[in-house]
Amino acid sequence: MLDELRSYLRDVSTGKVSLDQSREIEIILSRCWDELRGSGQENMEGYKLRTRTEDMQWAPPILAFDIERHAQQSGGSTRAVVHTWSVNTETSEASIVNARQRYIGGMDKPLKVGPLAEEVVKLILNRANDPRLRWLSDTRVKIATRKFIPKTNWRTTKGRTERFQTCVVQLLGEDWKWCKEPWHRDEIENTNSVPKNGDQ
């Protein structure tokens, strides 16, 4: 398989490789990737090369390219890692020679959850007929949290939601508790009595 790569590269001009040639090289390289010593760094596998390499350069016997890895995107990160690989076609070796971070999404603006919590608490205490609330009983209400906390990346959304829920309970008082069961998510209950303020 490596011989196929070497044979193809003989007809490739030195310098930046065209996009069409890069795509052809990706296919060939993916088939022989496991034959290269060092190719397993950072859990790299041949199939991940296809249609994903960037800025491919050919300086015999070195084939170099960048590839974005998404490991840091999970959990809400707005950055990805870009690895620069160097493939020595003579010694059959591959190695990462550089790593840098790249922003893959804009940073979210800070969200003040206090005013949002105050708004929902006012609605609850006045037993308001609001589309963001669904009264399940005299003492339990389901809050459409996403109407107050817009969904963004996972980590940011989780942090905002937790702060929002903590603030809501603090404002309502210790008798109010968030239901812990997953199937009662976003439900809050007065464990003592029916709220009197604004009761109809």
Image: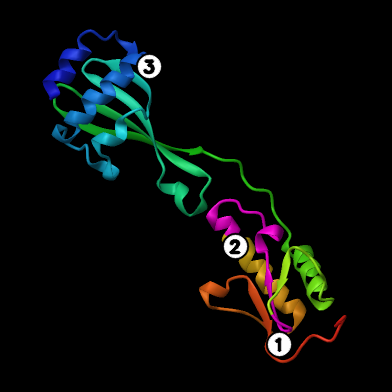
Residue 20: x and y in percent read 35, 15
The residue lying at 18 percent from left, 22 percent from top is: 89
The residue lying at 71 percent from left, 60 percent from top is: 148
Amino acid on which disc 2 is placed: Gly
Amino acid on which disc 1 is placed: Asp
What residue does disc 1 label?
Answer: 175
Residue 15: x and y in percent read 34, 12
Q: Secondary structure at mark 1?
A: loop
Residue 24: x and y in percent read 28, 19
Q: Is residue 145 magenta?
A: yes
What residue does disc 2 label?
Answer: 159
Dots 2, 1 in contact, CB < 8 A: no
- The N terminus is located in which quarter? top left
Q: CA distance from mark 3 to mark 1?
A: 64 Å
What residue does disc 3 label?
Answer: 19
Q: CA distance from mark 2 to mark 1?
A: 24 Å
Q: Which region shows up in magenta?
A: 137-157
Point out which mark residue 44 bears: none
Residue 149: x and y in percent read 67, 58
Where 16 falls versus 180 (above or below)?
A: above
Q: Secondary structure at mark 3?
A: helix
| Disc nearer the start of the sequence (2/3) | 3
Rendered image quadrant of residue 197: bottom right
